[in-house]
Image (cartoon, rainbow, N blue to C red):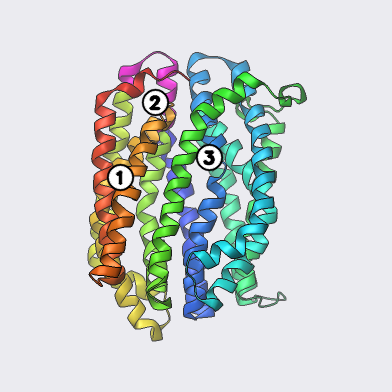
Amino acid sequence: MLRLALPVLAEQLLFALVMLVDVWLTGRFLKEAPELAAIGLIAYLLWFLTSLFDFVAIGATAITARFVGAGNKQGVRLVANQSLLVGIAVSCVATSLGFLLARPSVTLLGLENEAAQFAVRYLDYILPVLPAIMIQKVGIACLRGAGDMLTAFWVMSLVNLVNIGVSCTLVIGLGPFPDLGWDGLAIGTAAAYVTGGLLVLLLLVGGRGGLALHLQMLWPDADMIRRLLRIGVPGGANTLLVIVCNLWFVSLINRLGNDAAAAHSVAIRLESLGFLPGAAFSMAAATLAGQYLGAGDAHRAGRSVLMACLTACGIMLSMGIAFYFGGLQLADFFLAPEENDIAEMSAQLLRIAGLAMLPLAVEMVLVGALRGAGDTRWPLLFTLIGFLGMRIPLTYLAIDVFQWGVLGAWYAMLFDLVVRCLMVLYRFYHGGWKNIQV
C-alpha cells in the first residue's frame, strides 16, 4: 500500500504547491480581488477540463489492474492503445466545444465583468493543449493500474516544476523575461501540460510498464471500447457531476461579491492540501482492489482498502486540526497585508474545512476502491444524492433565505460530505463491489 501511495502523495504535494504558487503570485504580485476571484474559478475549470478524460481513464485503470492481477500482458497492451484511441476522440470534441462555450460558461458561473475577462483569457491558453492533457491523464491512468506509480511520480514532478518555473518567471519578470502578469500564469500551466503529454507519449512508445503502443492495436476494438466505457462512463459522469455541482456551488458564492469569492479561493486552495492523502490512498486502494480481484483474492482486496482508508484518516485528521487552529496564519501568508478582511474570512472557512477532513478521507478512499473494482454506478448515485439533494439546496437556503453568506455555504458542503461518507461506507461493507465483472 505504501509503495503505491507514497509516490502519489509526493506527486500530489508538488501539484498542490503549483496551485498554491498560483494563489501566492496572484495575491502578492497581482494583488487585486478580480484576479483572486478568477484564479478560484480557474481551479474548478481546470479540474473540469482534466476530468473530461475520466470517461476513459477510470475504465483504463480498473481493467489494466484486473489484467495485471490475472497475468494477461496482451490485454494490458490492448487497454493502453484503445484508451488513447478513445481519448483522442474525446479531446477533439472537448477542444471544439471549449472555444464555443468558454465565455458563456464563465458568465453563467457568476463572476463579475473584470474577473470574468481574466478567466476567459486564461482558458484561451489552455484549450489548445487539451490533447496533451488527454495523453498525460490516460497514459498515467494505465501506468497506475499496472502498479507503476514511480513513473507517474517522476513525470508529474517534472510537469509541476515546469509549471512553477515558467509561471514565476513570466509573472514576476525574472531576468531577461518580460513581466506578463496574468498571462504568465496561463502560459506556465499550458507549458506544463504540453511537457507532460510529450513525456507520457515517449514512455508509451518505449513500452514502459508493458504498455507499448502498436499501430495494429490502435485500430478500434469494439469489445474493449465497450468494456472501457461500461466502467468509465458512470465513473466519468460521477467526476463531472461533482465538478459541475462544485461550479454551481462556487457560482452561488460568486454572487456574494469579489471579496467572498476571493476568500473562498484562498481557503479552497489551502484546503486542497488536506485532499492530498485522500487522493494518494484512493489511487492505492483502486490499484490494490483491482489487482487482488483480478487474482481472485477478494479477502485481501477488502483488507488492503481498509488499511488505505485508516491511514488516510489519520493523516487528514491531523491536517484538519491544523486548519482549525492555524487558518489565519495560513491565509495571511498568501495575501498582501491590505487584504486583512479576506484573510479573516478565509480563516473562518478553514475552520469548517478542519471539521470536514475525516468524512472526506473515508469518502475519497472508498470511492477510489469501488472504482478500482469497476463498481462506478453506486458512487454516481451517492454523488447525485449528496450534491443535488443536500449541498446545492442547502446552499440556496443558507445564502438566500438565512443570509449566512459564504460561511453558510461551507456548512452546507460539510453536511453533504458527511452524508456521502455514510453512504459509501454502507456500500463498502455490503460487499457487492467484490462481484463486479469488468
Residue 353 drawn in magenta: no
Q: Is residue 423 left or right of residue 279?
A: left
Q: Earlier in the sequence, mark 1 or mark 3?
A: 3
The span picked out in magenta is: 285-300
Q: Earlier in the sequence, mark 2 or mark 1?
A: 2
Q: What residue would you read off at disc 3?
A: 54
Q: Amino acid at mark 1?
A: Ala
CA separation, marks 2 and 1? 17 Å
Of labels 1 and 3, the one closer to you: 3
Q: Position of residue 267 (x, y in %)?
A: 36, 66
Q: Are marks 2 and 1 in contact (CB under 8 Å)?
A: no
Q: Amino acid at mark 2?
A: Ala
Q: Residue furthest bottom?
A: 338
The residue positioned 65% from the left and 33% from the top of the image is 86
Classify the position of the N terminus by image quarter: top left
Packing grade of label 3 (10 A; few <14, some 14-19, many >=20) is: many
Q: What residue would you read off at disc 2?
A: 289
Q: What residue would you read off at disc 1?
A: 361
CA separation, marks 2 and 3? 18 Å
